[in-house]
Image: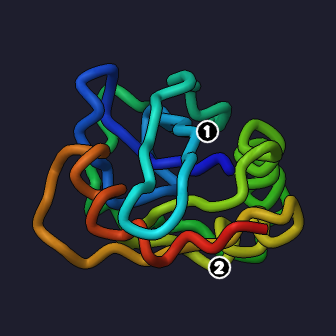
Amino acid sequence: MKIAIPVKDESLTFFGNAGHTPKFAIYDMSGTGMFRSFKLESVKNNPRTDLDHEEEEEDHECAHGHDDAEHIAQHNKMGLVLDSCDYIVVKRACKNTANAMSAHGVKIVKYSGDSLKADAILRELSSKFISQ
């Protein structure tokens, strides 16, 4: 099973706004119950070309309309790059992120804790990931 986590960079620091994250860390989960383990498979760039990832803020609120066709197309690029994932962990996600993930079979798991590192978040949420 594959799980995506939005991260700032290769330090694997969690980035709560999934639609605006610079990168995604992709993990493979194996095992069951309390014996689950997570292995980093890759770190992929967010393919959206309408963002300035160097200046993007985690708490950014978009000023454009969410029904804008180009905006929706940008979110669909994220769905394509995460198509092999079963889950994505988010703190925040707009409806276009949710729709893009759903269209590609990626389930959203909300994280509201205080951890900043992807591996700690995975351990905290491990019971939420149900084998397909």
Which quadrant holds residue 42? Answer: top right
Give coordinates of residue 65: x percent, y percent: 65, 74
Q: Circle 1 sits in a helix, a strand or a loop, which is it?
A: loop
Which quadrant holds residue 129? Answer: bottom right
Q: Of marks 1 and 2, which one's residue comes earlier in the chain?
A: 1
* Residue in the picture at 16% in, 50% down: 116
Q: Is residue 105 left or right of residue 125?
A: right
Between 19 and 109, the residue placed more toward the observer is 109
Residue 125, compared with residue 2, is above or below; it is: below
Residue 96, compared with residue 77, is above or below; it is: below
Which quadrant holds residue 44? Answer: top right
Q: Circle 2 sits in a helix, a strand or a loop, which is it?
A: helix
The residue pinned by badge 2 equals 95
Give coordinates of residue 124: x percent, y percent: 27, 67
Q: Amino acid at mark 2?
A: Lys
Between 97 and 119, the residue placed more toward the observer is 119
Q: Amino acid at mark 1?
A: Asp
The residue pinned by badge 1 equals 50
* Residue in the picture at 84% in, 65% down: 105
Between 92 and 123, the residue placed more toward the observer is 123
Residue 20, compared with residue 89, is above or below; it is: above
Q: Is residue 1 left or right of residue 109?
A: right
Disc 1 to disc 2, how far (Cα)? Answer: 17 Å
Give coordinates of residue 119: x percent, y percent: 29, 44
